[in-house]
Image (cartoon, rainbow, N blue to C red):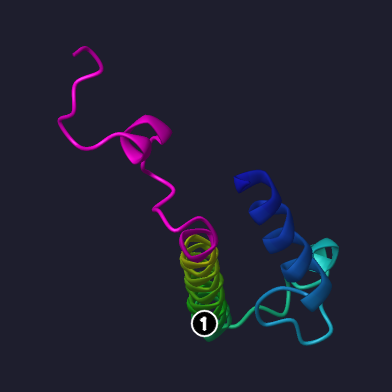
Amino acid sequence: MKVMTLAALLMQMTSAGGAGSEGRRAGNHVDLVGEGHPRAVKEDITSLKGEITSLKEQFRLARERQRLAAEEKQRQEEARYGVTPKATPAAATRGAGASTHP
């Protein structure tokens, strides 16, 4: 699962051009060496922080959707079978504390 998340993150960043991509790509860094100004790095870091914050929010929302979907599935199973999925079949058929030996 983490591999897929990392792949999705990498794909999103490369397709969007990464932080501060004013027409620049990762392979063009050699051309930019002479034109760097003191605030460029700070601006790029700020852009990266913004992207990270945005991605954290997206992943938080995705986890929340997964949690809600799991809860809904559990409610449906409880409604369908009339017992919680955690209950064992033996406990559901016998009374609690009932002995199997007379």
Please state the horizontal and vertical placement of residue 22, each as a whole percent of the image: 77, 87
Residue nearest the observer in this picture, 17 or 69 = 69
Please state the horizontal and vertical placement of residue 72, each as a whole percent of the image: 51, 70
Left or right of 37 in this view: 45: left
Q: Is residue 12 in the magenta section? A: no
* Residue 28 picture quarter: bottom right
Left or right of 97 in this view: 9: right
Residue nearest the observer in this picture, 39 or 9 = 9
Residue positioned most to the top = 101
Give the residue type at disc 1: Gly
Residue nearest the observer in this picture, 33 or 48 = 48
Please state the horizontal and vertical placement of residue 39, each as a whole percent of the image: 52, 85
Residue positioned most to the front = 102
Q: Is residue 82 in the magenta section? A: yes
Circle 1 residue? 50
Identify the secondary structure beneath mark 1: helix
**Span of residues in magenta:** 77-102
* Residue 99 picture quarter: top left
Residue lying at 42% horizontally and 35% vertically, measured from the top left: 89
